[in-house]
Image (cartoon, grey):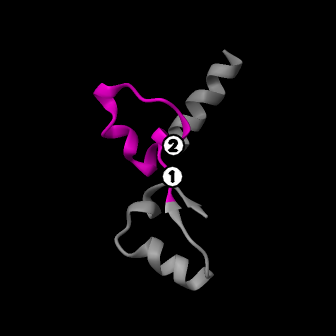
Amino acid sequence: MLVVGGGAVVRGLPPRLASLLGMDLRPLTPCDLSACAPSIQDRCRAPGLVAALGLALHEGEHA
């Protein structure tokens, strides 16, 4: 299961959820979904930005 948003970086939460659900969990970052410029690679590794990226990509389709 993929974990996004602030919950993906709460210390201990993903492993606890994995244990409770009986499945592997891993954080999803914008880098997993889209190419990021080298100058912003560090910022693109924040799971909390996945929703923002999705909204930006969606808006780009309708612009």
Q: 10 Å neighbourhood of mark 1: few (<14), some, or many (≥20)?
A: many
Residue pointed to by mark 2: 32
**Residue 59, percent across and down?**
63, 25
Q: Is residue 21 above or below residue 57?
A: below
Query: Is there a contact, CB below 8 Å, between mark 1 and mark 2?
Result: yes
Q: For the point 38% across and 75% down, which residue is it?
A: 12
Q: Nearer the viewer, residue 53 or 29?
A: 29
Q: For the point 48% across and 40% down, which residue is it?
A: 30
Which corner quadrant holds the N terminus?
bottom right
Residue 16 badge: none
Magenta stretch? 27-50
Q: Secondary structure at mark 2?
A: helix
The residue under label 1 is which amino acid type? Leu
Q: For the point 51% across and 52% down, which residue is it?
A: 28
The residue under label 2 is which amino acid type? Asp
**Residue 15, percent across and down?**
45, 76
Q: For the point 46% across and 39% down, which residue is it?
A: 31
Q: 10 Å neighbourhood of mark 2: few (<14), some, or many (≥20)?
A: few
Left of 15 or right of it: where is 54?
Answer: right
**Residue 40, percent across and down?**
32, 30
Residue pointed to by mark 1: 28
Q: Nearer the viewer, residue 28 or 9?
A: 28
Q: Is residue 45 above or below residue 15?
A: above
The residues tagged by marks 1 and 2 sit, at their Cα atoms, a distance apart of 6 Å
The answer to whether residue 18 is magenta is no
Q: Secondary structure at mark 1?
A: loop
**Residue 5, percent across and down?**
48, 54
Which corner quadrant holds the C terminus?
top right
